[in-house]
Image (cartoon, rainbow, N blue to C red):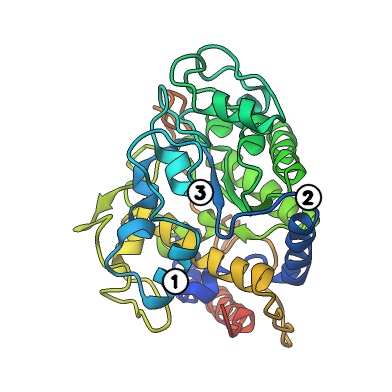
């Protein structure tokens, strides 16, 4: 019971605004700005402004992921500016490999359970090999026209994708938001094997001078300890490589520290929810406890997981565009402890169970030990508030 009380007290320190959403890589912010600019500067052919790929599994392939970014009525002028920049309106009706809309390329059905950059059920090792998630293996190629013919093929590869081919099909992309690992987690792959494959995926994108924004994976209802281990590796890799980070896991816990199973995630499911608590994908994300002036989310973001993820992506791309493309100076950290690369509050133990997986039939979702006195709980709460205040920064 005590770890539940600590989690609740820690949650009180959360602000649930865009500053919090973008804080998780503050410790290496100047480094990721420089790294992304160096990746883009190495390109020998022109890049398309605002071309942002979305690389992932069913959580990215799902149309629900892009609903708020593409048409959310609650988007502020600032939100509309960034979503316009990364071309959410570029969404042709058919299969158009020349589209510059990253959401379109991820979500447009090409073959069984996949788009051109995201596929249901795919794990990192399958994205590296091009096989194991569909029909014939997708070959690896660095020839752009050949790569485009592979990713837009409607019959041969099923839900297989191959990362070198995907990156080579879209060499004029500036950025790629990458969230993979849920299906690895469902399969019980070691965190070391998972992160090695994720590093290969990032390297393939950077070889095409596409700068990568990494995301942690959501909690896992059946194997959350492994999901936490994956996310620890993701955060460490983002810091060591100099990559911007969206901490989807931490942002879920900020809103639902103990009750994410059945709220922000489907009940005993690995996918973010599309509705709940009287809210859905079209709800005003800033209403009922939020504030559009400060980009603080309200109750809808605590109940609809895809809505939260959509909003988080847009907030991070505001910061990425500002620092990397517009070359705005990174704020100098103030005194006091920084947020560090780790998560916010630790979750309660996940309920045991097993079930369906990330769109392809495979499933993928710290307490204080010993006696805890009321005084210790108060110290934990005060410390959490102090840490949150120290981590605040102006700007994006």
Give the spatial CA distance, label 3 vs label 2. 19 Å
Measured from the top left, where is residue 322 in percent x and y? 61, 73
Q: Nearer the viewer, residue 237 or 349?
A: 237
- 3 to 262, vertically: above or below: below
The spot of residue 24 in percent (x, y) is: 63, 66
> Which of 69 and 303 lies nearest the eye of the viewer?
69
Tell me whether the residue at label 3 lies in contact with that at label 2, contact meaning CB atoms closer than 8 angstroms.
no
Q: Mark 1 points at which residue?
A: 81
Q: Position of residue 341 (x, y in %)?
A: 69, 62
Task: Please report whichever mark, 1 or 2, sits nearer to the chain's N-terminal start.
Answer: 2
- Seen as rendered, the residue at the extreme bottom is 335
The answer to which image quadrant residue 221 occupies is top left
Asked whether, in this view, residue 147 is left or right of residue 294, the answer is right
Q: Mark 2 points at which residue?
A: 44
For discs 1 and 3, the disc positioned in front in the rendered view:
3
Q: Residue at x 67, y 49 (%)?
A: 234
Residue 180 figure quarter: top right
Vertical relation: 381 (above or below) 190: below
Secondary structure under tag 1 reads helix
- Quadrant occupied by the N terminus: bottom left
Q: Nearer the observer, disc 1 or disc 2?
A: 2
Q: In this view, does 234 lie to the left or right of 266?
A: right
Q: 129 left or right of 148?
A: right
- The secondary element bearing badge 3 is classed as loop
Q: How far apart are marks 1 and 2 (CA)?
A: 28 Å
Number of numbered callouts drawn: 3
Residue corresponding to mark 3: 100
């Amino acid at each position: 019971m005590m770890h539940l009380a600590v989690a609740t007290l820690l949650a009180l320190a959360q602000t649930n605004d865009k500053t919090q959403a973008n804080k998780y890589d503050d410790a290496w912010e100047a480094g990721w700005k420089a790294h992304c600019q160096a990746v883009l500067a190495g390109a020998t052919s022109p890049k398309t402004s605002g071309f942002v790929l979305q690389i992932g599994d069913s959580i990215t392939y799902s149309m629900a992921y892009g609903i708020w970014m593409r048409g959310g009525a609650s988007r502020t002028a600032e939100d509309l500016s960034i979503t316009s920049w990364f071309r959410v309106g570029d969404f042709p009706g058919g299969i158009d490999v020349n589209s510059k809309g990253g959401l379109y390329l991820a979500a447009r059905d090409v073959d069984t359970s996949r788009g051109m950059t995201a596929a249901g059920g795919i794990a990192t090792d399958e994205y590296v090999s091009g096989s194991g998630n569909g029909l014939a293996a997708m070959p690896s190629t660095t020839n752009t026209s050949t790569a485009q013919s592979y990713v837009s093929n409607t019959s041969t590869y099923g839900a297989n994708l191959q990362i070198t081919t995907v990156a080579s099909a879209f060499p004029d992309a500036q950025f790629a938001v990458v969230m993979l690992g849920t299906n690895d987690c469902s399969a019980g792959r070691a965190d070391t094997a998972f992160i090695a494959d994720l590093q290969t995926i990032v390297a393939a994108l950077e070889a095409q001078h596409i700068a990568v924004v990494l995301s942690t994976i959501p909690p896992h209802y059946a194997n959350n300890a492994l999901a936490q281990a994956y996310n620890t590796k993701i955060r460490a890799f983002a810091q060591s490589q100099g990559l911007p980070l969206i901490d989807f896991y931490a942002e879920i816990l900020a809103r639902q520290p103990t009750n994410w199973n059945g709220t922000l995630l489907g009940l005993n499911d690995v996918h973010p929810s599309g509705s709940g608590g009287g809210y859905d994908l079209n709800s005003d994300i800033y209403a009922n406890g939020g504030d559009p002036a400060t980009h603080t989310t309200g109750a809808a973001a605590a109940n609809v997981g895809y809505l939260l993820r959509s909003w988080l992506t847009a907030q991070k791309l505001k910061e990425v565009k500002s620092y990397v493309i517009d070359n705005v100076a990174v704020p100098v950290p103030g005194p006091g402890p920084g947020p560090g690369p780790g998560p916010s509050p630790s979750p309660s133990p996940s309920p045991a169970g097993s079930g369906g997986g990330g769109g392809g039939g495979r499933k993928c979702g710290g307490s204080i030990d010993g006696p805890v006195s009321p005084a210790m709980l108060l110290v934990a709460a005060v410390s959490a508030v102090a840490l949150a205040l120290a981590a605040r920064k102006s700007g994006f």
